């Protein structure tokens, strides 16, 4: 480092942590309400979050004459016992969808239309035809960022938050560091919205051995949960919100939803279309059933797998390969060229990708967590769910703002955190390389928290994750990039511990992508039950509600 790091102090009314889709939705609502707002992210607003890589659809019910196009239908699909969502939240999501569609189109996002002027919508993930198709989806983030900056949103790019500040039982701000320059930032705020993404990636291995070749953004490593856990927030559903997808062989990308929804047939090594054995909606079923079905075929020796698409209408097939898939990941056509992939000429080989660990902050109908002043901007999933969740959280928070907290009496805590942030740059003696520290986490999770698990193995995983955690003080960062990765790995480790601990408590299979070998059947005893984890006396505690 060329300069001595300094502490930079800022103050705002509403602090939004994360500038992905959820953070952008929150900033939009906050500025509409006239609230002084600061967005913070370790990335850059124009490219951060999963949306920074693009997206090919936006879910919306629009109240048209088309079947299943009402908010009541949205409630019917999403208001499941144990989901963690309330009916009020789902209805509010549905009510915000049309406004967000109008906003996106007004900013130049290329939502596709049918010849009659209606939106081109397709079905996906077992849901009705709510998915508005998007062309040039890789441009979405830049278009939204341009609008937010024009609205006067303050944006702090390249700052990673490592700790939330809490005073008198209420959120008071956050501490972090500039990932390029090393300066420590202390931000006091009336209210904080956590919008750092529901996904926790880089936690298990994929076939390429490249932890950054992931389905969603590899820079989402569980900060949403690690930060909330440390200040005592309740986190729910870490035992069941674990997901995966099929990916083109060796190429981590989203977009398989569009392939499934267009009528593709998944074939095993025998040329059999096997998904009818596992779900009546076949390939267009909820994602967990396609993954569990494909994995069963895999362990029974019927791999590899291919998506057969040559029976699909040629115009739709061209749209799928050359419009939707590149909109989700801009390099998809480069992949096709190098692998000789042409949907119209031959089946495309696919495989099961890595497991993405997840969960949800326990959230009331005002989108506030169990810690006063801390709001959840990541209630629902997908581009639509994230953008709308952030919008709803900020709209609610804007009505309940208090003056920014005085954090001067937290100075000892702040100084200690700033020192802790930079400590990996100064580790001497017997050091652990940053990449070894993180890869050790991934090795444990891949082996003991893969698609098939049991209690004995998960308990070993917890022991080994604890062993890895004991080496935190010896992990060496040689530069600012590695320093960011050290702190990402610490958040990853915390999230993996919580996901593993919670999965041990659920003694059944069938509600997520994994199967417990020791409890292979689904149990009615868990119907409607939600597992909560929080921090008590310095350790994680779980309980059912």
Image (cartoon, rainbow, N blue to C red):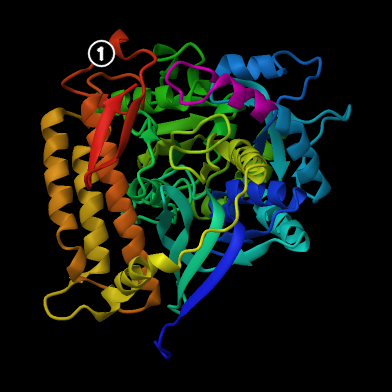
- Residue 540 sits in quarter: top left
- Residue 457 sits in quarter: top left
- Magenta part of the protein: which range? 78-94
In front here: 347 or 276?
276
81 in the magenta segment: yes
**Image coordinates for residue 518, horizontal then vertical, percent:** 15, 21
- Above-or-below relation of 210 to 420: above
In front here: 411 or 254?
411
Whether residue 205 is visible, yes or no, is no
Q: Which quadrant does the C terminus fall into? A: top left
**Image coordinates for residue 315, horizontal then vertical, percent:** 73, 33
**Image coordinates for residue 429, horizontal then vertical, percent:** 12, 80
The residue under label 1 is: 521
In front here: 281 or 170?
170
Give the left or right position of residue 209, taking residue 320 as reference.
left
What element does badge 1 sit on? Answer: loop
Which residue is at a point 42% across and 57% down the rendered structure image?
Answer: 165
């Amino acid at each position: 480092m060329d300069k001595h790091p300094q502490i930079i102090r800022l103050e705002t009314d509403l602090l939004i942590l994360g500038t992905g889709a959820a953070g952008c939705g929150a900033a939009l609502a906050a500025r509409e309400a006239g609230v002084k707002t600061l967005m913070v992210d370790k990335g850059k607003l124009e490219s951060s979050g999963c949306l920074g890589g693009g997206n090919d659809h936006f879910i919306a019910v629009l109240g048209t004459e088309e079947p299943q196009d009402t908010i009541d239908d949205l409630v019917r699909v999403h208001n499941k016992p144990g989901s963690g969502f309330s009916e009020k939240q789902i209805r509010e999501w549905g009510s915000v969808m049309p406004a967000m569609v109008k906003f996106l189109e007004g900013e130049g996002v290329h939502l596709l239309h049918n010849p009659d002027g209606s939106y081109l919508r397709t079905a996906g993930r077992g849901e009705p035809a709510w998915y508005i198709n998007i062309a040039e989806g890789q441009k979405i983030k830049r278009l939204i960022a341009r609008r937010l900056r024009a609205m006067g949103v303050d944006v702090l790019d390249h700052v990673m938050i490592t700790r939330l500040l809490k005073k008198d039982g209420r959120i008071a701000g956050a501490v972090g560091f500039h990932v390029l320059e090393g300066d420590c930032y202390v931000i006091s705020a009336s209210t904080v919205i956590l919008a750092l993404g529901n996904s926790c990636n880089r936690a298990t291995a994929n076939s390429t051995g490249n932890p950054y070749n992931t389905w969603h953004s590899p820079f989402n490593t569980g900060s949403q949960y690690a930060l909330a856990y440390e200040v005592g927030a309740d986190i729910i559903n870490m035992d069941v919100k674990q997901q995966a997808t099929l990916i083109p062989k060796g190429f981590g990308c989203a977009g398989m939803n569009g392939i499934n929804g267009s009528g593709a047939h998944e074939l095993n090594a025998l040329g059999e279309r096997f998904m009818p054995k596992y779900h009546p909606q076949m390939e267009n079923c909820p994602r967990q059933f396609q993954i569990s079905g494909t994995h069963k075929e895999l362990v029974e020796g019927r791999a590899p797998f291919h998506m057969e698409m040559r029976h699909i209408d040629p115009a739709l097939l061209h749209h799928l390969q050359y419009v939707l898939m590149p909109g989700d990941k801009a390099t998809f056509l480069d992949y096709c060229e190098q692998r000789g992939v042409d949907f119209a000429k031959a089946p495309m080989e696919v495989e099961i990708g890595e497991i993405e660990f997840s969960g949800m902050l326990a959230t009331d109908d005002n989108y506030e967590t169990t810690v006063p002043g801390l709001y959840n901007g990541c209630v629902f999933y997908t581009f639509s769910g994230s953008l709308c969740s952030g919008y709803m959280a900020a709209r609610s928070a804007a009505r309940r703002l208090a003056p920014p907290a005085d954090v001067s009496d937290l100075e000892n805590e702040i100084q200690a955190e700033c020192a802790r942030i930079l400590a990996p740059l100064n580790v001497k003696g017997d050091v652990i390389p940053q990449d070894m520290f993180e890869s050790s986490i991934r090795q444990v999770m891949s082996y003991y928290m893969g698609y098939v698990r049991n209690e004995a193995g998960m308990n070993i995983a917890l022991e080994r994750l604890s062993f890895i955690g004991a080496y935190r003080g010896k992990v060496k960062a040689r530069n600012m990039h590695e320093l960011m990765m050290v702190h990402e790995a610490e958040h990853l480790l915390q999230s993996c511990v919580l996901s593993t601990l919670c999965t041990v408590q659920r003694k059944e299979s069938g509600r997520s992508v994994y199967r417990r070998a020791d409890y292979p059947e689904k149990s009615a005893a868990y119907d409607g039950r939600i597992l909560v984890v929080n921090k008590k006396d310095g350790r994680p505690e779980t309980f059912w509600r």
